[in-house]
Amino acid sequence: MFKNHETTPPMMSVAHLLTQKQNLLSRLEEFPGPNERAEIEQLLGKIDAELNAVDSPDRL
């Protein structure tokens, strides 16, 4: 189905990233402590970077 065996189906990857992002945003709404908040924000930044890379693969 996919010629490049290293490439995952883009929609599955995007769906997974968006699910992770939603879960992290939900955790932020629960007013986490400062350390957990920093960790969540760091993870959100990584997810956003990955989503941007999917949108523009030449940025990888």
Image (spheres, rainbow, N blue to C red):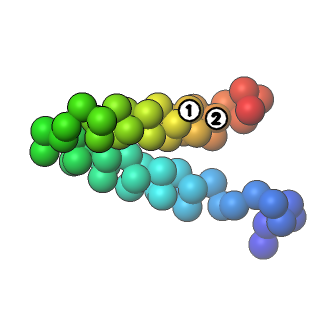
Question: Is 59 on the left-hand or right-hand side of 29?
Answer: right
In three-dimensional space, the C-alpha distance between marks 1 and 2, rounded to whole angstroms, equals 6 Å
Question: Is 31 on the left-hand or right-hand side of 53?
Answer: left
Q: Quadrant of the C terminus?
A: top right
- Amino acid type, callout 2: Ala
Residue 34 visible in the snapshot: yes
- Residue 19 sits in which quadrant? bottom left
What residue is at 13 percent from the left and 45 percent from the top? 30
- Amino acid type, callout 1: Ala
Q: Are marks 1 and 2 in contact (CB under 8 Å)?
A: yes
Q: Secondary structure at mark 1?
A: helix
Q: Which residue is mark 1?
A: 49
Total labels drawn: 2
Instruction: Tell me the mark number nearer the camera, choosing from 1 and 2.
Output: 1
Task: Locate residue 1, reporting x and y percent.
Answer: 78, 72
Task: Locate residue 50, reporting x and y percent.
Answer: 58, 39
Nearest the camera: 54 or 22? Answer: 22
Nearest the camera: 33 or 60? Answer: 33
Question: Is 20 on the left-hand or right-hand side of 56?
Answer: left
Q: Which residue is mark 2?
A: 53
- Marking on residue 32: none
Nearest the camera: 11 or 19? Answer: 19
* Residue at the extreme left: 30
What residue is at 56 percent from the left and 32 percent from the top? 49
Q: Secondary structure at mark 2?
A: helix
What residue is at 31 percent from the left and 47 percent from the top? 24
* Residue at the extreme top: 59
